[in-house]
């Protein structure tokens, strides 16, 4: 899979979100080399669940009419938060690919929900941990965070 191609699109979506006055996040759901859905953050619409990843997962579920996305990869310009990470595990994603670690609340680097083996006690609700790939196009993703005045590696930029 061409991870750079998909992360590049996530970064473009994060720029669109920022330009619309929202937080700079974009996400895709991909099977093989085909994009199923793409979304950007929509929290400014007064919905705290309006994270790009959640918006994409909701759209994918409606399209596919299933809660089994085990053949799909979720892409994001930034590491999914804990709320998104639980949804990723419930929807049984095969893989999660992102650029940047979360500046403060990662569902992988701070609270390791994405790899938490204890969730397997609750099969079939939670899936086996997805493959995690991070750091793709990190510098390009950081540029959007800089425009937003966000934290990178614990520092205000």
Image: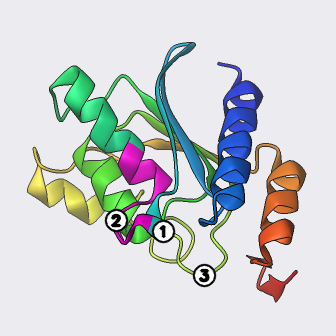
Q: Residue at x 53, y 78 (%)?
A: 105
| Residues marked 1 and 3 touching at CB (< 8 Å) | no
Of marks 2 and 3, the one in the foreground:
2
Counting from the top left corner in percent of width and height, residue 138 is at 82, 52
Is 70 situated left or right of 17 in this image? Answer: left
Q: Residues within 10 Å of mark 3 (few under 14, many from 20)?
A: few
Counting from the top left corner in percent of width and height, residue 22 is at 59, 65
Counting from the top left corner in percent of width and height, residue 72 is at 41, 27
Residue at numbered disc 3:
104
Give the secondary structure at mark 1: helix
Q: Residues within 10 Å of mark 1 (few under 14, many from 20)?
A: few
The magenta stretch is: 45-55
C-alpha separation, residue under disc 1 versus residue under disc 3 = 20 Å
5 in magenta: no
Q: Residue at x 45, y 75 (%)?
A: 111
Please determine whether, in this image, residue 136 is positioned above or below residue 111.
Answer: above
Residue at numbered disc 1:
44
**Could you say which quadrant of the image residue 1 lies in?**
top right
Is 9 situated left or right of 147 in this image? Answer: left
Residue at numbered disc 2:
49
Q: Residue at x 83, y 61 (%)?
A: 142
Q: Residue at x 88, y 59 (%)?
A: 143
Give the secondary structure at mark 2: loop
**Count of numbered marks:** 3
Of marks 1 and 3, the one in the foreground:
1
Please determine whether, in this image, residue 76 is positioned above or below residue 2.
Answer: below
Is 64 situated left or right of 2 in this image? Answer: left
């Amino acid at each position: 899979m061409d991870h750079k191609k998909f992360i590049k699109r996530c970064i473009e979506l994060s720029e669109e979100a920022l330009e619309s006055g929202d937080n700079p996040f974009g996400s895709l759901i991909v099977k093989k080399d085909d994009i199923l859905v793409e979304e950007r953050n929509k929290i400014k619409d007064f919905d705290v669940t309006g994270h790009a990843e959640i918006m994409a997962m909701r759209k994918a579920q409606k399209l596919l009419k299933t809660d089994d996305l085990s053949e799909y990869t979720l892409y994001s310009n930034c590491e999914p938060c804990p709320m998104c990470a639980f949804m990723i595990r419930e929807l049984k994603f095969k893989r999660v690919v992102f650029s940047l670690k979360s500046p403060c609340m990662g569902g992988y680097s701070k609270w390791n929900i994405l790899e938490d083996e204890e969730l397997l006690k609750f099969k079939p609700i939670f899936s086996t941990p997805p493959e995690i790939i991070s750091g793709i196009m990190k510098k390009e993703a950081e540029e959007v965070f800089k425009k937003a005045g966000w934290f990178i590696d614990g520092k205000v930029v």
